[in-house]
Image: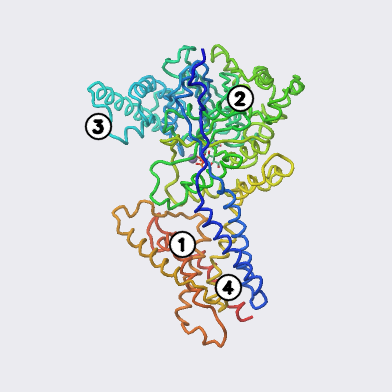
Amino acid sequence: MANPTTSLPLYQRVARKNTIARAIELSILSLLLSLLAYRILSFQDHGFSWLLASLCESWFAFNWVLTVSAKWNQVEYKTYPQRVLQRKPELPPVDMFVTTADPVLEPPILTVNTVLSLLALDFPADKLACYVSDDGGSPLTFYSLVEASKFAKLWVPFCKKYSIQVRAPFRYFSGESMSSQDTSPQFQQDWKKMKDEYEQLGQKIEDAAKGSIPCELAGEFADFLNIQRRNHASIVKVIWENKEAGNANGVLPHLVYISREKRPKHPHHFKAGAMNVLTRVSRVMTNAPFVLNVDCDMYVNNPQIVLHALCLLLGVRSDKDCAYVQFPQHFYDGLKDDPFGNQLVVLFEYLGRGVAGILGPFYGGTGCFHRRKVIYGLSPQEYDEEISGKLSDQNLQKTFGSSVEFTKSAAQILSGSKSISSSPHDLLSSVEAANQVAACVYEYGTAWGREMGWIYGSTTEDVFTGLTIQGRGWKSTNCTPTPPGFLGCTPTGGPATMTQQKRWATGLLEILVSRRSPLILTLVGKLQFRQCLAYLWILLSGLRSVPELCYATLPAYCIISGSRFLPKLLGLLETVFEVTQKEQSSTNSRDDNNADVGRFTFDESPIFIPATTVLLVNLTALVIAIVRFRPAAHGRDGSGIGEVIFSSCVVLCLWAFLKGLFGKGKYGIPLATVYKSGALALLFVNLSIWTSMG
Ligand SMILES: O=c1ccn([C@@H]2O[C@H](COP(=O)(O)OP(=O)(O)O[C@H]3O[C@H](CO)[C@@H](O)[C@H](O)[C@H]3O)[C@@H](O)[C@H]2O)c(=O)[nH]1
Ligand SMILES: [Mn+2]
């Protein structure tokens, strides 16, 4: 009998109104273009600084075009999880991947919380399997997961019984108090028990970390005996197998631990390598058609995420409209006003929604649901057509590698059968096959990392992999439920943030110069032109520092050398007032009780030298401007008030560094950095003076 509710759409695509924003963005663009036109027309009358300014401004204008294009059509998807739930018997299984790499940098309790939040999802337990990849090969991580699975047997029913929203216990117990919840004595009793149990779990893990491990590397832990982190055989352990297949109310989903084989001479390709192993191991074990991947530092904040994602994955008219569903990254305990710019608000709030209106969001590396077939490198055309010709054994081995189990199941999925594929009856019998596909030689001579799976060759494997998928003609969607699907942690200090930004900048540049650069994929692949522009926006983000750095030193150069790069009296007065206000507000914030929260922190890394140098150069220039206050005294035009204002603006932009000059400990810029920057600044000042005399 037809159920009327099954005909209702599972999602709605909503266009956002952004007329005013568009008008403002276009006005800025026209101002930039007029400035450029003016520069070109008056080129003859000016020297080096004028030329440099024009080059920088051309770059800014180009970048602005990319920005405007990316943000032009903003869309959102509204999803209806209850409607998916009504299709209960047909709900597809989902494999969930968690990656962790280092038990010191990523404390196991964090990974445990992420895993617990996944095990407790509002989805039939017999349709979920959780795979944890541990690149640290750490017995501590394994031990923590074993203990966590015991705790989960209490935790998961508790969450489901009381419809708890935050199912990562460290957040649940740190946040809302019991009072906002159920006040029944039963709840209070259960809550207390749960809190005690969680504290015991935390204690056990802490003790184990200190060395008093109850696991003397015997029994289950024997595999970890004498292993080195970068030199060991693969370890696959079924921590918990849900034997109640067909029982949606069974307590826990499967939980599997994997530490792939590592050998010093074999490249392991970091996270991308780990993701490919997860794909293969899950393939020989549970083989779900959909895959969710999260980093160990991102827990589930909305227990209905699978239903939300399925609204899109199952609800689209054609699978090619949704290769993956990306949840935007949000962060917990984020510092106010995002002083390090690492909460990625612009990227996800504005650009993300805009790109969603073109081909769909970039893949962000975590909080993403994938169609397994897409990971195998299929293009939408192949997906729709008969591809039986491709299915000779030889071909399959060349593509996927030599595991019989793997190629068998891959053939099944590639043959176009869109039905849910079956999985082996018990996980333990597939451990051997899993070990085989987790070996480091497995990928040699195959398409893994090149044509299929997570793509190698960039430390931002996420953007690279998404780009490759979209270059084949797939679209993607974003999913923005309330409350947000996932919450993660982000660095709260200068050095860690800078390291992260450096990795992103290099990784993105690696993509730009690769043979899968968006320009090439637009010419020979199926990437849309505007999606290409959007990718350029993100891939060029590291290079932007070059013109920005030049532009920031330009006013200082002009003041010192007595030249100009701004047109005479440009109506900058309003800016002056704004600048003063900024100064005011940052003085106020120093009086806050929490003055140190969000304060920039430094270390000896050379990464802090450029900004410190720019600051010193501009401070010197301002001192020079004050000292020789009468600009016309030299009998030449000299620099103007515009340059002085601009230079002050640069100093204000580098306020955190200015404070760092006087700060102590980690809040201060180390003396060595100050000396090095000072030397560079001195060189710059002298060069500027020298050019003005030449
Ligand atoms: O050899 C490695 C290195 C890293 N990871 C894992 O990769 C994830 C991301 O690493 P993290 O240090 O947290 O980097 P972030 O800068 O926070 O990550 C962002 O940027 C990465 C790309 O640079 C993406 O992969 C991430 O999804 C995205 O959140 C973590 O789960 C790690 O455990 C591995 O599994 N193996
Ligand atoms: Mn992270």
Residue 581's label in the rendered image is none
Q: Amino acid at mark 1?
A: Leu
Camera-side residue: 254 or 429? 254
Report how far apart the C-alphas of labels 4 and 2 lie in the structure: 58 Å
Question: Where's residue 289, x and y in %?
Answer: 58, 23
Image position, residue 368 (x, y; %): 53, 33
Answer whether residue 319 is visible to the viewer in this image.
yes
Residue under label 3, please give it: 179
Q: Disc 4 vs disc 2: which is toward the camera?
A: 4
Quadrant assignment for the C terminus:
bottom right
Marks 3 and 1: CB-CB under 8 Å?
no
Is residue 496 at least partly visible in the picture?
no
Three-letter residue code for mark 3: Ser
Q: How many marks?
A: 4
Judged from the image, the secondary structure of the residue bearing numbered disc 4 is loop
Residue named by callout 4:
565
Specify the label residue 280 is tagged with: 2
Q: Residue at x 55, y 27 (%)?
A: 315
Amino acid type shown at disc 4? Phe
Choose the circle earlier in sequence order: 1 or 2.
2
Q: CA distance from mark 3 to mark 4?
A: 62 Å
Determine which quarter of the picture holds residue 430. Answer: top right
How far, Cα to Cα, is label 4 from label 1? Answer: 21 Å
CA distance for labels 1 and 2: 48 Å
Q: Which residue is mark 1?
A: 654
Q: Is residue 398 left or right of residue 597?
A: right
| Upstream in sequence: badge 3 or badge 2 | 3
Disc number lying in front (4 or 1)? 4
Do the residues under discs 3 and 4 have CB atoms within 8 angstroms?
no
Q: Are marks 4 and 1 in contact (CB under 8 Å)?
A: no
